[in-house]
Amino acid sequence: MLLYDGACAVCTRIATRFARSVEIAPIQGELGARLLRHLTPPERLAAMHIALPDGRVRTGGDAIAPLLRATRLAVLAPLAEVAPCLTRRAYALVVRHRALLGRVM
């Protein structure tokens, strides 16, 4: 389950692209609140999350490999796992510039 910021146009567009492969839900919804109940509301909205079938939750850059693994891009998941610090930095870069991305998407 991919949990995304439903108030963010870029986040919604990206989540929608993954909807063919994974279930998606906005963080602000009832399901998002339930799955992320261990986080404060600001922590929930700070990043995207992947809720895994075993109940674990991965956040931000740490969610990239499990997300890729659930899609037709699964072959890229090991790259995200090899250098998690780079994956986290890449995710942080996208988050910092999501307003710009929104203009070009």
Image: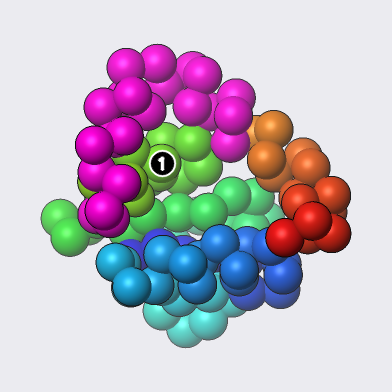
User: Where does residue 76 sit, x and y in percent of width and height?
Assistant: 31, 34
Q: Quadrant of the C terminus?
A: bottom right
User: Where does residue 48 sit, x and y in percent of width and height?
Assistant: 53, 54
Q: Out of 62 and 65, give the one closest to the viewer.
A: 65
Residue sitting at 71 percent across and 67 percent down?
8
Res. 21 in view: yes
User: Where does residue 41 sit, x and y in percent of width and height?
Assistant: 62, 62
Q: Residue furthest bottom?
A: 30
> Is residue 19 highlighted in magenta?
no
Residue 4 placement, left or right of 94: left
User: Which residue matches tag 1?
Assistant: 64
Q: Is residue 88 above or below residue 56?
A: above
> Is residue 78 highlighted in magenta?
yes
Give the extent of the magenta segment.
70-91
User: Where does residue 12 sit, x and y in percent of width and height?
Assistant: 61, 70
Q: Out of 89 and 74, give the one closest to the viewer.
A: 74
Q: Is residue 25 above or below residue 74?
A: below
Q: Quadrant of the N terminus?
A: bottom left
Res. 40 in view: no
The main secondary structure of the magenta stretch is helix
Residue sitting at 40 percent across and 16 percent down?
83
Residue 66 placement, left or right of 49: left
Q: Is residue 31 above or below residue 100?
A: below
Kindly state the secondary structure of the residue where label 1 is placed: helix
Residue type at numbered disc 1:
Ile
Colour scheme used in the picture? rainbow
Q: Out of 22 and 73, give the one closest to the viewer.
A: 73
Q: Quadrant of residue 66?
A: top left
Residue sitting at 49 percent across and 18 percent down?
85
Residue 36 placement, left or right of 6: left
